[in-house]
Image (cartoon, rainbow, N blue to C red):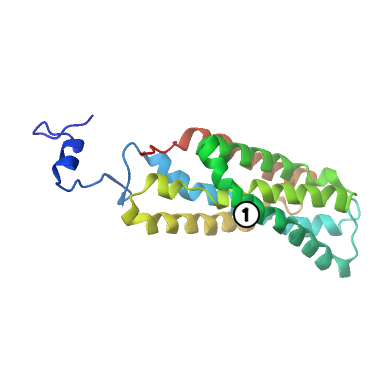
Amino acid sequence: MDKTSTGVTPTDLLYSGEKVKPRTIFRIPVKDGVTYCNIIAIPLVPLTMMLLSTYLNAQVIFILADPAFFGIAPDKIGYVSGVLIFASLPGAIIGTFFIGFVFDILGRKITLFVSFFIGSLLLAVIPWTAPKLYEGLLVVRVLIQLCFCAPVSNPLPADYIHREAIGMGTSMQGIGLVIGEVISMGVLFRLTVNMDPVYGFAIAGGLGLFFSFCFLFIVKEPQLR
């Protein structure tokens, strides 16, 4: 355990009643053992989720209208896309309720990895569900929404940041959401909008797979006391 210049450990100070000033990263007070990579994971999780989900919601409109895939009439696209989103919400509500137990049982690292890994694979196979709208695309859309329950409800700010600064952790998650949407629409969508949807969804899914493996290295299990 680290000691001060006087040979006193932080634990000694804690039990002596003297207030111990926590270590900071990016001027954020963090808990013992937390690294820069752990703090970066806080906004990166919602960033990745928003990047994938925004791309899905935007690109699915085009694939629904494409005669080579689903060929939905222009006046029906709004209704069909609304049904796809609405049908995925009940499962998302139930999944979000139980995902906290999964985080506690499997841990943060494995839960996030599996969620993004499976969700990214499902995103990549969306073009291959054509022309089966409800028994293909709808089922995949529901499963993707279930996968995104974990990043939506991840407890990383509470795991890494001291409780007096937990609001800063929440702000970091919000920043990740905004940046993810900007990258998705401003970069990824613009780069793939003229591609064959098979390649566009494959690129988006590949990005998700890349980040899913990153979380195996930058997410740290909390020290529960």
Left or right of residue 96, residue 19 in this image: left
> How many numbered tags mark residues here?
1
Quadrant in the picture for residue 79: bottom right
Left or right of residue 45, residue 1 in this image: left
Q: Nearer the viewer, residue 15 or 42?
A: 15
Q: Nearer the viewer, residue 187 or 209?
A: 209
Left or right of residue 149, residue 132 in this image: right
The N terminus is located in which quarter?
Answer: top left
Residue at image point 62% right, 41% down: 115
Q: Nearer the viewer, residue 106 or 165?
A: 106
Check disc 1 and report the residue beneath it. Answer: 184
Residue at image point 33% right, 50% down: 162
Q: Of helix, strand and loop, which one carries label 1?
A: helix
The C terminus is located in which quarter?
Answer: top left
Say if 86 sits above or below 51 in the image. Answer: below
Residue at image point 58% right, 46% down: 99
User: Residue 186's x, y, as percent?
Assistant: 61, 58
Left or right of residue 55, residue 216 in this image: left
Is disc 1 surrounded by few (<14), some (14 to 19) or many (20+) residues within 10 Å? many
Amino acid type, residue under disc 1 in the picture: Ser
